[in-house]
Amino acid sequence: MAPFKLAIIVGSNRKASINRKLAQALAKLGSASFTPHFVQIDDLPMYNQDLEAAAWPQAATRLKSEIEGADAVLVVTPEHNRSIPAVLKNAIDWAARPSGKGVWGGKAAAIIGTSPGGVGTACAQQHLRDILGNQGALVMGGQMFITWKDGLVDDTDAIPNDATRAFLQTFMEKFAGLVGKLAA
Ligand code: FNR
C-alpha cells in the first residue's frame, strides 16, 4: 500500500520550538507508513468572520486544501496556560469555516505534545481532543505527554534513547493502523 499523506501541524510559531523538533522526529519515525507534509499556520491572519465574505485569505485556502488532501493529521502541540496555543486554535478555526464547509469532518487525527514540565500538555491535549472531536475529526485514543529534555531529539531528528524511540515508534505505528482501518 502507498504511504498515507500525513499533514503535520505544529502548534507553535517559535523558531526553536521543541514541539517542531519532536514533530520532525515523528515524521522520520513514521516514514514507512506516512509521507509527511508540514502545514504552515504562522502566516494566517487572526480569524475574523468579516473576512469570510470580504477577502477570504489565501493562507486559509492553502491550509484547508492541505488538510483536505491529507489522509491524516498529526497535531504536535505545546500547552499555553493549560490550553492550546492561540496560533493553533486560530488555524483550527480557519479550517472549520465557512460553516458547513470545514475540512475536519471524518479526518483521522492524532495528538501529541511536549513540554519541559512533567505532565505538561495534558490539559492542552484534552482541550484539543474536544475541539477536533466537535468538528467531527476521528481522533485516536490515548494520551502522549512527552517530557522534553535536551538531547531527546538529536540534530538529525533521530531519538537517541532506545526506550523513548520505541515508545514513539509504537505511537506512529498505532496511528498508521488506525488510518489504514479508516481508509479500508
Ligand atoms: C508556556 N509553557 C507551559 N508549559 C506547560 O507545560 N503548561 C502550560 O500551561 C504552559 N504555559 C505556557 C504559556 C506560555 C504563554 C508560554 C510561552 C509557555 C511552557 C512551554 O511548555 C514551553 O515554552 C515550550 O517550550 C513551548 O513549546 P514550543 O513552543 O517550544 O514548541
Image (spheres, helix red, strand yellow):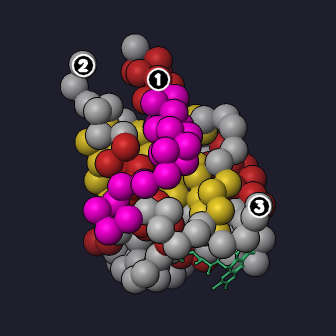
What's the CA distance linking mark 2 and mark 1? Answer: 12 Å
Q: Mark 1 points at which residue?
A: 177
Q: Give the structural element (helix, strand or loop) at label 1.
A: helix
Up the image or down, 160 lies above or below 79; here it is above
Q: Give the structural element (helix, strand or loop) at label 2.
A: loop
Decide which of 11, 164 is in the foreground and name it: 164
Can residue 26 be seen here? yes
Decide which of 159, 131 is in the foreground and name it: 159
Residue 90: x and y in percent read 54, 71
Q: Type of residue at label 2?
A: Met
Q: In which quarter of the image is the C terminus?
A: top left
Residue 22: x and y in percent read 46, 60
Residue 27: x and y in percent read 35, 49
**Magenta-highlighted residues:** 154-175
Are the residues flagged by discs 1 and 3 in contact, CB closer than 8 Å? no
Q: Quadrant of residue 79?
A: bottom right
Earlier residue among tags 2 and 3? 2
